[in-house]
Image: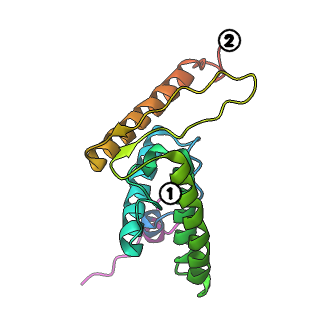
Amino acid sequence: MTDKTHEPDPDEPDNADTSTNAVENDLPEPPHPVNWNLLSADDLEAEWLELNRWVDWLRHTYGLPASVIPPFWHRHPELVWELSALHLHWLSAYDPEQNGSAPLGWHRDFADARARLRDWVTASGTRLDRDRPTRQTAWPGEEPAEPVEDRLIANRDEDFVQFVLDDVTGRRREEDDFYSGIDPDTGELRD
């Protein structure tokens, strides 16, 4: 058996440890807040799918009724933001390096979140088999809000997939429009 030593790569910094770098690149990112308004199209799709998986786990684990988490929660920004924050809180509370009492704090905050979710579900009008956009109140001087009507939705999973595809397509279009207005020579927005 021959003894082979690792010859340093001249392009590699002296302090680089390739085996450690490979492992670090495979580690998941630490939990981070999700600003749904600023996600790229690809990140938007990934976040939708992750949040959907977690919400499905949450509703089954805790036996939550549609009055707390309705099937069409994804169509209501007020529910998306609340559930997204709750998800981040859960990820942080159950992080292996977290304090042992963090899960108890999450459950306390989860009780508060359930009350807010109930309020928003009631205000939004979303139900088990139908949905409508959350009613908006026009302020003085604004155009009156358009009337909203219930829409029957027969298959929640099909609706979610189509909703995400439409949302990602819209975000990709916004990105394309933005980048088409950039001068490739200067990197500045064209007038």
The local secondary structure at tag 2 comes to: loop
Q: How far across and how far down the image is residue 191, in percent?
A: 68, 11
Whether residue 36 is visible: yes
Given the image, on which type of amino acid does mark 1 rest? Pro
Q: Quadrant of residue 170?
A: top left
Q: Main secondary structure of the magenta part?
A: loop
Q: Is residue 9 magenta?
A: yes
User: What are the residue bounds of the magenta stretch?
Assistant: 1-21
Answer above or below: position of 166 versus 36.
above
The residue closer to the viewer here, 176 or 65, is 65
Q: Is residue 172 left or right of residue 60?
A: right
Precedes in sequence: disc 2 or disc 1: 1
Whether residue 30 is visible: no
Q: Residue at x 36, y 44 (%)?
A: 130
Q: How far across and how far down the image is residue 31, in percent?
A: 55, 64
The residue tagged 2 is 191
Answer above or below: position of 53 versus 153.
below
The residue tagged 1 is 10
Q: Residue at x 42, y 37 (%)?
A: 168
Label 2 or label 1, whichever lies nearer to me, is 2
Q: Is residue 89 left or right of residue 27?
A: right
